[in-house]
Image (cartoon, rainbow, N blue to C red):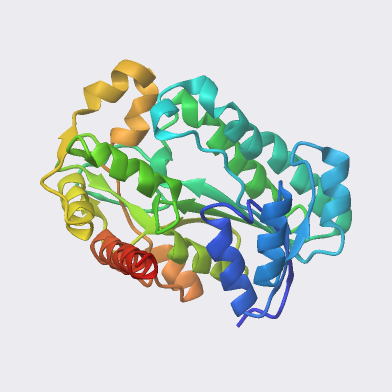
Amino acid sequence: MTPSMRCFVTGATGAVGRPAVRALLDAGHQVRGVARTPERAAALEAAGAEPVVADLFDHDGLVAAVAGSDAILHLATNVPPLSKMGFLPAWKTHNRLRTETTRHLLAAARIHGVRRFVKESITFTYPDRGAEWIDESVPPDERAKALAPTLEGERLVLAFHGAVGDGVVLRFGLFYGPDARSTDEALRVARVHLAPTVGRPDGYVSSIHVDDAGTSVVAALGAPAGVYNVVDDEPLTRREYADAFAAAFDLPHLRISPAGMLRAVAGRSARALTASQRVSNRRFREATGWAPAYRSAREGWAAIGAARGHEHAADREASR
């Protein structure tokens, strides 16, 4: 078991940051989390973490904020809403977080002697491999320019290993969860009978419940330096994923939009979101002993749907 560490967390109030903070605290670690608003700072404090006010693009401010930490967990993202995902300018802040902020945090780590650096990344960087399994030995697909900042951020962290400390990159699958903004967006799309995924129905999508992503961050504190895939045990085809989502919310059959619709907006960069990627989590499991609570999106979506159903029932009862 990893000894208690003082963890500096960016993105601490985000979709992955919230469950990661909970998991870190449950494991006995101390957490200092970056919060951008008083409301989010209050939420962190209520959870048992110390809120930190910091501009993630301010080098000097981040250097000062990181002081006293044993580990830096860079989980901050700025993913645009579904309606804007196909437009490259909408990813500007997100890309700056993956490159510019990563540089600032790595500089802070070097200044303060912080040896452990964990950074989030994504599995969308892999090429289309059909039904073949993808592990960390498969080289990323460099053709998608939209993913260049993601790969640059990974390289920055991996270069940190050996020079100063241990850099760990977690390539997460497609996030889903009870509080994720993407869930509400997917439910809105489902009103017109469309599935939350785009591409070939028989193509694979590798996903991860945000709670499982949170526990993986804790496990990463004790992982050897390197790149790891963090996904469900059982990736589903897009048809299976859409059916699991529909079953969880008692929806009718959902149509999967063809890849050409996304390519018309995003061009060649759409390949990353429509490729068939059957990703394996074996390396991370063997290195850390981590395992997802939800084997696949079938179980994960079913739990989310049941929880939301209970919440709605409770709200109705309270309103009587």
The spot of residue 72 in percent (x, y) is 71, 58
At a point 15% along the width and 42% down the height, the residue shown is 254
Q: Looking at this view, is 36 or 198 the one in front?
A: 36
- In which quadrant of the rendered view does residue 83 lie? top left
Left or right, 187 with respect to 58, comes to left
Give the residue furthest to the front: 320
Residue 161 shows up from this direction: no
Q: Looking at this view, is 297 or 303 the one in front?
A: 303
The spot of residue 192 in percent (x, y) is 20, 34
The spot of residue 30 in percent (x, y) is 73, 72
- Quadrant location of the N terminus in the rendered image: bottom right
At a point 17% along the width and 57% down the height, the residue shown is 247
Q: Is residue 204 above or below residue 165?
A: above
Q: In this view, does 177 lie above or below 239?
A: below
Residue 282 shows up from this direction: yes
Left or right, 221 with respect to 280, comes to right
- Quadrant location of the C terminus in the rendered image: bottom left
Give the residue furthest to the bottom: 1
